[in-house]
Image (cartoon, rainbow, N blue to C red):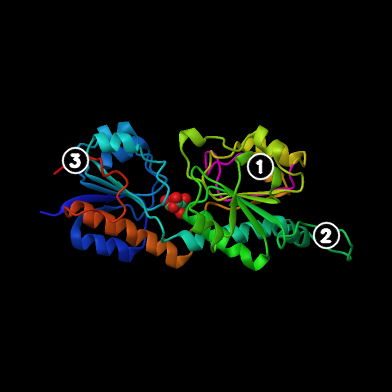
Amino acid sequence: MKHKILVARATFPDVVARLEQHFDVESNQGDQVFSPAELAERLQGKDGLFATLSERISAEVIAAAPALKAVCNMAVGYDNIDLAAASRAGIKVTNTPDVLNETTADFAWALLMATARRITEAEHWLRAGQWKKWRYDVLLGADLHGATLGILGMGRIGQAIARRSSGFGMKVIYHNRSRLPEELESGANHAGYVSKEDLLRTADHVVLTLPYSPQLHHTIGAAEIALMKPSATLVNIARGGIVDDAALIAALREHRIASAGLDVFENEPALNPDFLTLSNVVLTPHIASASEPTRRAMANCAADNLIAALGGRQPPNLLNPEANRKE
Ligand code: 8YV
């Protein structure tokens, strides 16, 4: 008999069709966002879950889904899943690393450039009919070339961002939980390791690419923003909650830093409405990985993991090998 799975959100129809070759699939192509109670109900009798970051797989949801054996997230981040509770319940958890590195790094640059050179603000100004004459000081921004780029969180995506900086002749500094091996620092990343404080003090542009965990909640708050240059740009493509949004809004309003480019927010998609009142932010709806080929690769990666996990094989991107085997 085929294993039963739930595909929690709409995804590429061909990926659903692929899953249907292996499983008895309940798919949510209507794209309803399930409440935790609805999710728990849908998981009754399900062996596997194809999840996205919108599904909170809490200890309660796990306890309510005794048949569940695998949760395969279509995301590299997995802060939506209580990994310890899943491991205790013998549930294998997987993510989708690597397939999104380059696309996400491209987007970090798009957001950084739009923010430093005030592209969104300029377009709004133009559309509002304010472009009446040339002026020497209209919409002056910050340079990227020759500037110092600070990358906080130097994992695979951080390194892909660093590699792109050489064309701009930038100096790259980074801070990470652990320092990169010498050959990675001096090679294509050409990045120097500094403390978080030195990074914030020295960088002209700060890009955040660190994964979220409760220990990293509000890694950037009022005190950290106070270390940054008044001319600095802050870009967050990591996760909501890494930045204290209220503190950032206050700093942007008072021009304590120049600008911010944000793809992720606390409580997204219900972002703090005060962001909408500021002209020195570029706001995007969590789309850093959203190129057609990459989102498709992520969906297929999650499907590969699910097929392996329920097929009795080691899933390629297993996050919790400690999960006791559950038959
Ligand atoms: C996804 C992301 O779009 O992979 C991640 O961790 O944040 C994004 O690439 C999102 O998480 C989809 O679930």
Front disc: 3 or 1: 1
In the drawing, does residue 155 fall left or right of residue 140? left
The amino acid at mark 2 is: Gln
> How would you rate the neighbour count of disc 3 (Cα within 10 Å): few for under 14, some for 14-19, many for 20 or more?
some
Residue 214 vertical position relative to residue 107 in the rendered view, above or below: above
Front disc: 1 or 2: 1
In the drawing, does residue 223 fall left or right of residue 138? left
Tell me the distance, in whole angstroms, between the alpha carbons under discs 3 and 1. Answer: 49 Å
In the drawing, does residue 246 fall left or right of residue 84? right
The amino acid at mark 1 is: Asp
Tell me the distance, in whole angstroms, between the alpha carbons under discs 1 and 2. Answer: 40 Å
Asked if residue 240 shows in the view, the reply is yes
Position in image of residue 141 (x %, y %): 77, 57
- Tell me which label, 2 or 3, sits earlier in the chain: 3
Which residue does the numbered mark 1 point to in the structure image? 198
Q: Nearer the viewer, residue 316 or 264?
A: 316
Q: Nearer the viewer, residue 41 or 223?
A: 223
Q: Which residues are magenta?
A: 257-272
Dot label at residue 142 = none
Q: Residue at x 72, y 45 (%)?
A: 278
Position in image of residue 80 (x %, y %): 40, 41
Which residue does the numbered mark 2 point to in the structure image? 130
